[in-house]
Structure formats: structure tokens, C-alpha cells
Amino acid sequence: MTPMPFSLPIPAEANALLDRDPLALLIGMTLDQQIPLEKAFTSPWVLGQRLGHEPTAQELAEFDPGALVEIFATPPALHRFPKAMAARVQEVCRVLVDRYDGDPAALWAGAGSGAELFRRVQALPGFGRQKAQILVALLGKQYSVRPDGWREAAGGYGEEGSFRSVADIVDGESLGRVREYKKQMKAATKQG
């Protein structure tokens, strides 16, 4: 995997963690709902700080659930729903341990097609169609994970030159364009 360096509007250390740790990327994607993306993608770094080290999928899968909720809920909470999202992260890690020997990158490594990659991602707890498409787009656009048909599997999020999700954020300008797209989609939903 030769990712482009992340340049989200978050601390440099949090971006660096996303660059080097596939589990951090998956945790960020898991948390990326009902909170700003900056919070979602900073939380894996904060989690590591609170634990005193970067966790593994195995460690989080086996973590005492109550203790993990406490870590998530410690102010500032890692998510606005710390109990539910601590459980979700733990569920994702358990799938990684059960199906991929605890190796988060094995989720996408060796996927023979975009459709297979999409199925693998969508099988994760909490990854519905849209979130799975966004992760497939993110992997293709920023991590060079591009099995045949990955753009089609990612739907509109996979389109070249689109500015629809975290998959498209590479600088301040692209962040602004993604925010504008989301604002337009929210307004269209309210009108429709």
C-alpha cells in the first residue's frame, strides 16, 4: 500500500497515524457518522494516546467492553455516542480477527474485483452501502487499492474529480468543495 499522505484538517500526528495504520483508517471510517469528519478521523489518534500505544485489532476485539466505553466516554468523548461506537469499533475489530487474522489491510489486500472489495467492506458491522462505497473510494483514490471495477463499486464516490466524501479531501480547497457538496445534498433532502 502506497498511500498519499493524509491532509485532513486535523493534527499532523493524527494524519500520520492514518497514513501508517490501516486500523486507524478503519476506526475513523467506523466513527464517521453523526459527528464532523475531523472528529471521527482524529479519534483513532486520541484513542492511542489514551491507551499509551497504538492498539491492534486483536487488542480491541478482546478489550473489556466496559473499560473501552470508559475510554471512549472520557471527555472529550471520542464520539457523541461513546457507548454505541465503542461497541461498534470492537465489533469491527472482532470481524478483522475472525476473518482476516487481525490484519486490517487484509480486508482489501487480494480483493479480486471492486465488487469483492465492496462486499468485504459492507460485511463490516455498521458499514451500509454508502459507507462501504466511501471506503472503497478512499482506498482507491488515496491508498492505490484499485482492483478491477473499484470505481463502479464505489458508485458516485469513485468518480474521478468528484468532491463528495473524505475520499476526495487532499487539501483545504478539496475540503471546502466536499463540505459544499454535503451542504447541497442536505438542502436537497430537506426540500425533497
Image (cartoon, rainbow, N blue to C red):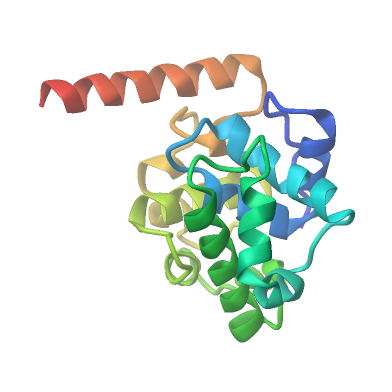
In the picture, measured across the screen, residue 4 lies left or right of residue 82, that is right
Q: Residue at x 43, y 59 (%)?
A: 127
Q: Residue at x 77, y 44 (%)?
A: 45
Relative vertical location of residue 138 with respect to residue 53 in this rendering, above or below = above
The quadrant in which residue 40 appears is top right
Q: Residue furthest left?
A: 192
Q: In screen coordinates, is 108 left or right of 121? A: right
Q: Front-most of 108 and 37?
A: 37
Residue 81 vs 179, above or below: the answer is: below
Residue that extends furthest to the right in the rendered view of this protein = 52
Quadrant in the picture for the C terminus: top left
Q: Residue at x 66, y 43 (%)?
A: 142
One can see residue 25 in this view: no
User: The N terminus appears in which quarter of the rendering?
Assistant: bottom right
Q: Position of residue 25 (x, y in %)?
A: 66, 51
Residue drawn at (57%, 46%) of the image = 138
The quadrant holding residue 146 is bottom right
Q: Is residue 58 above or below residue 179?
A: below
Q: Is residue 191 left or right of residue 59?
A: left
x, y (%) of residue 115?
Answer: 42, 67
Q: Nearer the viewer, residue 57 or 139?
A: 57
Q: Position of residue 13 (x, y in %)?
A: 84, 36
Given residues 154 and 40, the one toward you in this image is 40
* Residue 116 percent coordinates (x, y): 46, 72
